[in-house]
Structure formats: structure tokens, C-alpha cells
Image: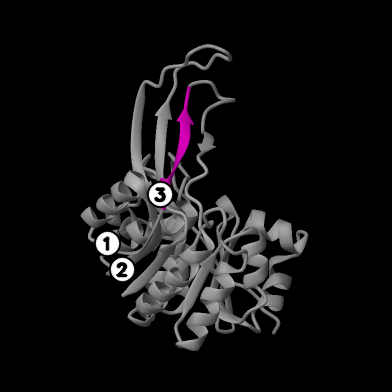
Amino acid sequence: MILSVCPNPSIDTYAWLDTIESGLPNRISELKQYPGGKATHIAMALSELKQKNTLLGNWAGTSGTWIKQECQLRDINISGIELEGQNRKCYTFRSPISSFNNTELLEPGPTFKKEDWNPFLEIFKTEASKSSLICVSGSWPKGAPEDGYSKLIDICNTIDKRIIIDCSGAQLKNALTKSFFGIHINEDELKSIYNNAPIEVIVKELSPKINLIAITKGREGLWLYYNGKFVHANVVIDQVISTVGSGDCLTAGIAYAVNNNMNIEDIAKYGVACGAANCLNEDLGILKLEDVENLLPKVKIKENTYAA
């Protein structure tokens, strides 16, 4: 069982607008809604890979109820606590106007109060204890502590559980003071912390305390370090329809392969194939198993030099 932890779930919404005029009413022609939040995408990808998993979140209002119901329809177990208010909605606007197409509008979501913290930690510890691997990904609701990820890492270390994190900002900086199993970092996060240092330098700095390091740079692919070995993986696809959620699906592929005790080459292949599979359809943060299976043999692996 893999545990996916989504501190700040959302309803991800495609909204189609043929025109946009400032100061005038603008009518949305079509809406499509999907369960969202980074770890929600991970949970849905794992379910498509036929991996049993639980999604733990902070749920609020009718939005939270809808997200949970949609995930349960995908055979995902649901856990977590209830917050006041509503889970956020995140809008991605689709338009023939190139300057407006793929513009995002994000609601604030619920507030995480001080008294919510201990109940969340208790449920996390219970669910983590039943799981073979934990993935924690995404932002927290406003009001949550800036060292939330760090505290979850401490719990996993105490109960001897492997955790893979994907976060940014203060959460990431606090987490990097700890030793833990795995991390997924994208290019933007690298720039903010390591001032464009070469990937080999970053791996050398992180590897003494992190077993698995996944670094992604969009079309340039995945650099993966795991237990002293370092590889690069990439796959070429003919047409990219949507990249939203691709990083999360890549994390899911890595988690799936790690949980099934695969070697680093196959871990990298699953990560890249899942990330690319997400790009092949317009559904937000959703991959198809058939696409993953077709892409796996096409992934190119190159071993990198790593100086310990």
C-alpha cells in the first residue's frame, strides 16, 4: 500500500473562453472538472497502474466531498481530517487567444488552524504505519506550519518508513535539513535554491542524506540518483496535449517502481513513461495505463558519472 498525502486538495477545472474582454461580461463556453492537488494526481496515477493506495488530505465543504467521491470511483482509499470552509478550485483557461490560453486562476482554499495540526499528525502516523511507501506532495492550506514537511519526515524516520517529497519554498528548505528517503525537484525549485548549479553538484550535496533524488527539467527529461547510481532518462512523444500534472505522474511512476523493488533503470523508465503519458491527453493530471505500457520500451537510459 502506498500513501499519497495531499495537504491542499483542489478541484482542477478547464474553462473554455472564446474571447476575453476587459470590463465586460465574458461567458465560459464549457467546463471540465477533475480531482486535483499534486498528491491527488499521484494517487490517481497509482490507481491507473493498479497499485493499491490511500489518499490522505485536508478536506473542506462540498468541494472536498466531490474530490473524495471522484477518487473513490477510481478505487482510491480516502483518509484525512475535515477543515472549515471549502477546498479550493483551480481554473485553467483554454482560449484561441494565445496570450490568455492556459492562464491559471487559483482560489485560496480553507484555513488550517493550530488545533487542526495534532489530529492531522495522528491520522498521518496511523496511515503511514500501514503503508510501504509515502508520497507527500504540494502546498499546504494557509495557516499550516512552514515546517509541515519536515515534521512528516520526522514521523517517517521514527517509524522507519520511506517518504518521497515534492514541495517548494519554505517547506522544501526546512525539509532539506533532514535525512529521508526520496525527493522530486524540478528545474524552477533548483534555480531558487542552488543558483543554477550543475545537476551533478546538487546530487553530490544531497546524496549523503537522501537515497533517491529525482530532478526534472521538462523536455530534457529526468536525472535520477538512487543508492549511489546516477542515470538520465527521457522519451520523445509526437504531440504534447497538456503538461499539467506531468511531474506528479512522474513521481507516481517512480513510487510505483520503488514499491515493486525495481532497479534504478526501470524506476527511471516508469517515472519518465508516466510523466509523458500524462501529456498525451487533455484530462488534467490523469494518465492511461495503455499509454504507459506503450512508452516504457521507448525510454532511453544513459548512465551518468557520479563522484561520491
Instruction: Name which residue lies at 56% across and 26% down.
Output: 100
Query: Which range is magenta?
Result: 84-95
Position above or below: 257 against 249: below
Spatial separation of the CA atoms under disc 2 and disc 1? 6 Å
Q: In this figure, which residue is indicated by the disc labeled 3? A: 36
State the image coordinates of residue 90 (x, y, percent, origin top left): 46, 40
* Tag 1: amino acid: Ile
Spatial separation of the CA atoms under disc 3 and disc 2? 16 Å
> Does residue 92 show up magenta in the picture?
yes
Instruction: Name which residue lies at 62% across and 72% down.
Output: 175
Q: In this figure, which residue is indicated by the disc labeled 2? A: 53
Secondary element under disc 3, as helix, strand or loop, is strand
Q: Is residue 26 visible?
A: yes
Q: Is residue 235 visible?
A: no
How many numbered marks does the figure carry?
3
Secondary element under disc 2, as helix, strand or loop, is strand
> Does residue 147 show up magenta in the picture?
no
Q: Residue furthest top?
A: 24
State the image coordinates of residue 194 (x, y, percent, origin top left): 75, 64
Using a 10 Å C-alpha cutoff, classify the residue at mark 1 as few (fewer than 14 neighbours), some (14 to 19) or many (20 or more).
Answer: many
Q: In this figure, which residue is indicated by the disc labeled 1? A: 76
Using a 10 Å C-alpha cutoff, classify the residue at mark 3 as few (fewer than 14 neighbours), some (14 to 19) or many (20 or more).
Answer: many
